[in-house]
Image: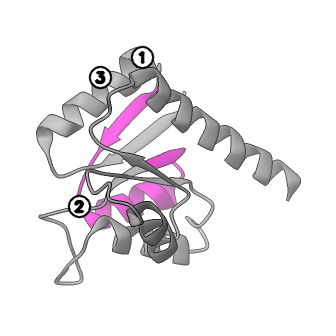
Amino acid sequence: MTTVLVVEDDPINWRVFQKILTRRGGLNALHTEDVEEILNIARSGGVDIILMDVSLGNSQYEGEPVDGLRITQLLKADPTTAHLPVILVTANAMVGDREAFLKKSGADGYIAKPILDHNDFIAQIRAMLAKTKDEEMRR
């Protein structure tokens, strides 16, 4: 079964994501905002894709506060996790944010919150998974 790691600091948003992912998408969903746990789960190969909130209020790494962009940079810089697709999920949906966030973080995709069309949300995740699988097969 496909497993999605949701990195989110708002428990209500996590519950919404979990319901959409499991009920609409038939996907397994895990959750954490602890950076060490994110890195360990990603390195273990236990997830297929990560949904990363950009604005994380409680996450720290090596004693410093970090946001989802920084965590994505860490994942993309690690050879064991660089292949793992990361989709940024954020309420910051101003003109230019998408491109700036993708460039800064190295993430593979971007979805604006709130998630209004659940089917489209699942379709975007599945498309990213298919794209990643195709790229891996070409290597």
Query: Distance of mark 1 from mark 2, alpha carbons?
Result: 26 Å
- How many badges with numbers are in the image? 3
Judging by the rendered image, the residue that carries numbered circle 3 is 19
Expressed as whole percent of the image width and height from the top left, the position of residue 125 reads: 53, 37
Expressed as whole percent of the image width and height from the top left, the position of residue 132 reads: 68, 49
Residue 4 lies in what quarter of the image?
top left
Extreme top residue here?
Answer: 23
Q: Considering depth in this image, is 44 or 31 the residue closer to the camera?
A: 31
Which segment is the magenta one? Answer: 27-50
> Position of 81 compared to 98: left or right?
right
Expressed as whole percent of the image width and height from the top left, the position of residue 100 reads: 44, 71
Secondary structure state at the residue bearing disc 3: helix
Q: Residue at x 32, y 28 (%)?
A: 116
Q: Amino acid at mark 1?
A: Arg
Judging by the rendered image, the residue that carries numbered circle 2 is 34
Bin the neighbour count of mark 3 within 10 Å (Cα to Cα): few under 14, some 14-19, many 20 and up: some
> Position of 123 compared to 13: left or right?
right
Q: Are marks 3 and 1 in contact (CB under 8 Å)?
A: yes
Q: Quadrant of the N terminus?
A: top right
Secondary structure state at the residue bearing disc 1: helix
Secondary structure state at the residue bearing disc 2: loop
Q: Amino acid at mark 3?
A: Lys
Q: Considering depth in this image, is 98 or 122 the residue closer to the camera?
A: 98
| Disc number placed over residue 24 in the picture, else none | 1
Bin the neighbour count of mark 2 within 10 Å (Cα to Cα): few under 14, some 14-19, many 20 and up: some
Bin the neighbour count of mark 1 within 10 Å (Cα to Cα): few under 14, some 14-19, many 20 and up: few
